[in-house]
Image: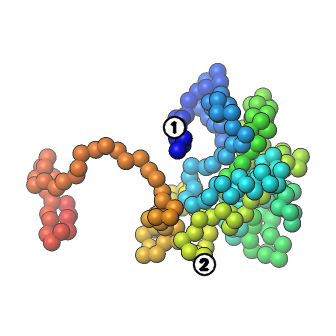
Amino acid sequence: MNEFVDLLPAQQRQGREHWYTGTADAVFQNLDIIRRYRAEYVVILAGDHIYKMDYSRMLLDHVESGAACTVACIEVPKTEATAFGVMEVSEQLQVKMFWEKPEDPPTLPGKPNSSLASMGIYVFNAEFLFGLLESDHADENSSHDFGKDILPKITEQGHVWAHPFSLSCVSTSPDAPDYWRDVGTLDAYWQANLDQAAIAPELDMYDSHWPIRTYAEPLPPAKFVQDRSGSHGMAMNTLVSG
């Protein structure tokens, strides 16, 4: 299928003596590897979010809009919006303003208790992205972060469009809510695990129509043995404790 995944652990690249200083710096330090693929577009994702999304729909939206950058967005309660980048968009979904973790998040028109949050999912025209990262790398006053530095800057220049998550969310049913969770804190991670423990979770990890693929390690089969290494346990009527 000509599909693959490359795992790139954090490294001190580009002649630097420190680890990644921000989300933009993390991409910049791997720029030579990204350029090898000669891609026309680059999709940038966060690693601490739980959701299912058809990225091809967002990419198509990006291409059709003619934007240089597209940001996936979702409606969140205003009380939670202080933890995210917050956007103000036009009727055509052009991003007019971008604030990173504002203390008083702006709300949506007609919805005083809701804000439009960035999901940390971006599509960039590749050459446009490369130029931004090189310019940001040379800026000693930058924190080298997409939300804090790059997105506010290019929003002012009129280069950013929004993509509503509802257009590309893969739901368990037509009536199911759009499930997206940021698990960047222990409490959020714990709650996301409880969500999956529900009898009918909003995000179905066992959906055969949209499977979640993972790496299966070639390990020997597991089995239960008696008094192994002095560890005592008990098995009664298929229930195991110890």
Splitting the image into 4 quarters, where does residue 175 fall? bottom right
Extreme-top residue of the structure: 15
Q: Is residue 19 left or right of residue 155?
A: left
Residue drawn at x 88%, y 50% is 158
Q: Is residue 188 left or right of residue 74?
A: left
Q: Secondary structure at mark 1?
A: loop
Q: How is colour applied across the structure in the image? A: rainbow
Q: CA distance from mark 1 to mark 2?
A: 36 Å
Splitting the image into 4 quarters, where does residue 20 fall? top right
- Where's residue 18, x and y in %? 61, 28
Residue 82 in view here: no
Q: Nearer the viewer, residue 7 or 147?
A: 7
Q: Are marks 1 and 2 in contact (CB under 8 Å)?
A: no
Extreme-front residue of the structure: 1
- Locate the C terminus by quadrant: bottom left
Relative to 117, residue 132 above or below? above
- Which comes sooner in the sequence, label 1 or label 2? 1
Q: Amino acid at mark 2?
A: Asp
Extreme-left residue of the structure: 226
- Give the residue number, with chain letter if any, for mark 1: 7
Residue drawn at x 20%, y 64% is 241
Relative to 33, residue 47 above or below? below
Residue drawn at x 80%, y 54% is 64
- Give the residue number, with chain letter if any, for mark 2: 175
Residue drawn at x 52%, y 67% is 203
Q: Is residue 164 left or right of residue 67?
A: left
- Where's residue 33, x and y in %? 62, 30
- Where's residue 131, x and y in %? 79, 33
Q: Amino acid at mark 1?
A: Leu
- Where's residue 25, x and y in %? 67, 35
